[in-house]
Amino acid sequence: MRLLLVSVLFASILTTPGWAQDHSAPLAIDVTIPPYVRTLEGTAVDTGGFSAGMSYDALRELAEKTYGADTFREMEGDLSMSLKGVRVVTADYVQLVYHNAKEFTARFTGPSGGPQTYLVDRAVQHEDIMTAPNRELMLDALTEKYGEPSTANQLPRGMALAWAFKDGIQVPCVMHGMTGPGPRCWVDDRGVSGRDAIKQVTDFDFLIHVVARSFRADSDKIQSYNVTIVDYKLRAETSAADTAALEAATEALLAASQGEMAKPSL
């Protein structure tokens, strides 16, 4: 159990009934889950050096070395919670870093995680069909790096593979459109909500997902592929910590607002 620290500044509080009452400064949530990169026996946990668990600074440094400086876009946002007319909002933090549409995407945890990356999606494109790898070479390279997959599906124009882990142990999962034992191994580069991550960790808590696409249906040459790495455990833990911090701050603000209520002048 990690100790949750919450720093909140309160100033004047609006007491007019029906108004949303904010504290005067953004809620500062202390980092209780510092950046780390998970290690798993028998498999790598990165794609091109990028992995879940990287801090913002570490990811930007590697990204700029890989793709060049000043080629990235960022999106910021905040977290908020309302209760009985009072509302608490965190400071803005980086939630998404991306490069050249969908060539590279990294999504970040909330403030309790630093933030740090919980999802990395990297795309690789082969322009020349003559030098592009075929399916066999692609599969050999993936197996060498990540080990035998939990599931694999040969498609008319490519293939999809996944490596699922629960508590550091590889577990079976089922690709979309397939049948078999194990939970569905799904991934969405648009991100994973904290609620979905908390549900997902009951089946597996770390996933490597690869989709490779061939040039044509009659070709085994791979034109492009995406490697997506998701740390559901990290997403679930940081989401729970953020929620607990917001709840504590909201309840404190509500108590303070009730203590300052003015007696009606009748």
Image: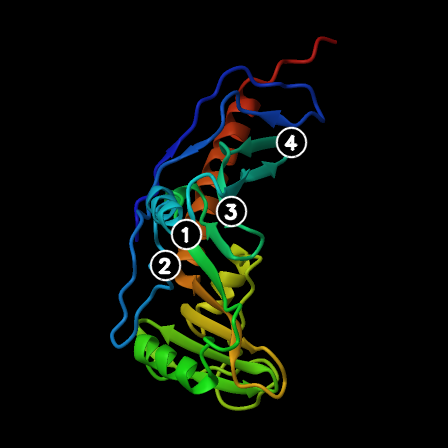
Q: Would you name the residue on which mark 2 appears?
A: 51
Sequence-earlier tag: 4 or 2:
2
Crowding near pointer 4: few (<14 within 10 Å), some, many (20+)? some
Q: Is 262 on the left-hand or right-hand side of 119? A: right
Q: Quadrant of the C terminus?
A: top right
Q: Would you name the residue on which mark 1 appears?
A: 117
Q: Is 82 on the left-hand or right-hand side of 210? A: right
Instruction: Tell me the kind of residue under disc 3.
Output: Leu
Given residues 100 and 118, the one toward you in this image is 100
Instruction: Tell me the kind of residue under disc 2.
Output: Ser
Q: Is 95 on the left-hand or right-hand side of 14? A: left
Instruction: Tell me the kind of residue under disc 1.
Output: Thr
Q: Would you name the residue on which mark 4 appears?
A: 85
Question: Alpha-carbon distance for marks 4 and 1?
Answer: 33 Å
Given residues 243 and 40, the one toward you in this image is 40
Mark 4 vs mark 3, foreground winner is: 3
Sequence-earlier tag: 2 or 1:
2
Residue contact between numbered discs 4 and 2, judged by CB atoms under 8 Å: no
Q: In this picture, is 2 found above or below 189?
A: above
Q: Would you name the residue on which mark 3 appears?
A: 96
